[in-house]
């Protein structure tokens, strides 16, 4: 699946900084199908993953557990260093957000 990551953003309530893909119909359709298959799982506190509310993103910095300054330092670094990325999405995975991140399941997209 072609992908173009063209911007960075942040969820200020959770102090997460992320890169965002430029969306296309294939990606939106894939997300709707995935959400439909996962809707029976606990989705509390994951409102940004619902269809028509989804904020597609790739986390770059999770700073909620760090000092206040870490969020601003990471934001400043990304504002100066981020470069757009073009490529292919070849795999999707489910991870457990721990440190280190734990892979739970993945699927090849080709």
Image (spheres, rainbow, N blue to C red):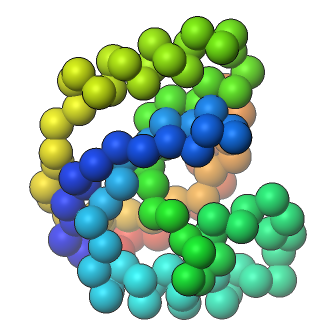
Is 88 left, or right, of 69 in this rendering? Answer: left
Percent of width and height locating residue 41 = 82, 74
Instruction: Indicate left or right for 2 with 12 as reference.
Output: left
Query: Does 104 sit above or below residue 70?
Result: below
The image quadrant where one finds the N terminus is bottom left
Depicted 108 relative to depicted 75: above or below: below
- What residue do we see at 55% from left, 21% from top? 71
Report whether residue 110 is seen: no
Q: Please tell me in which quadrant of the rendered image residue 47 appears.
A: bottom right
Residue 84 appears at what percent x and percent y?
16, 45
Q: Residue at x 50, y 80 (%)?
A: 31
Say whether residue 95 is visible. Answer: yes
Question: In the drawing, does residue 96 fall left or right of residue 83?
Answer: right
Total residue callouts: 0
Instruction: Report the residue at 45% width, 55% height from top.
Output: 57
Q: Position of residue 110 (x, y in %)?
A: 28, 77
Identity of the residue drawn at 17% across and 48% down? 85
Quarter location, residue 30: bottom left
Please provide percent x and percent y for residue 26: 32, 86
Looking at the image, residue 108 lies above or below residue 97: below
């Amino acid at each position: 699946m072609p992908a173009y990551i063209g911007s960075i953003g942040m969820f200020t309530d959770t102090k997460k900084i992320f890169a965002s893909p430029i969306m296309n119909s294939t990606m939106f359709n894939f997300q709707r199908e995935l959400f439909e298959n996962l809707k029976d799982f606990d989705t509390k506190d994951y409102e940004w993953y619902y269809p028509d509310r989804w904020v597609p993103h790739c986390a770059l910095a999770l700073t909620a557990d760090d000092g206040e300054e870490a969020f601003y330092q990471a934001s400043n670094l990304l504002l100066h260093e981020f470069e757009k990325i073009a490529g292919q999405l070849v795999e999707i995975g489910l991870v457990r957000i721990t440190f280190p991140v734990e892979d739970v399941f993945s699927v090849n997209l080709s």
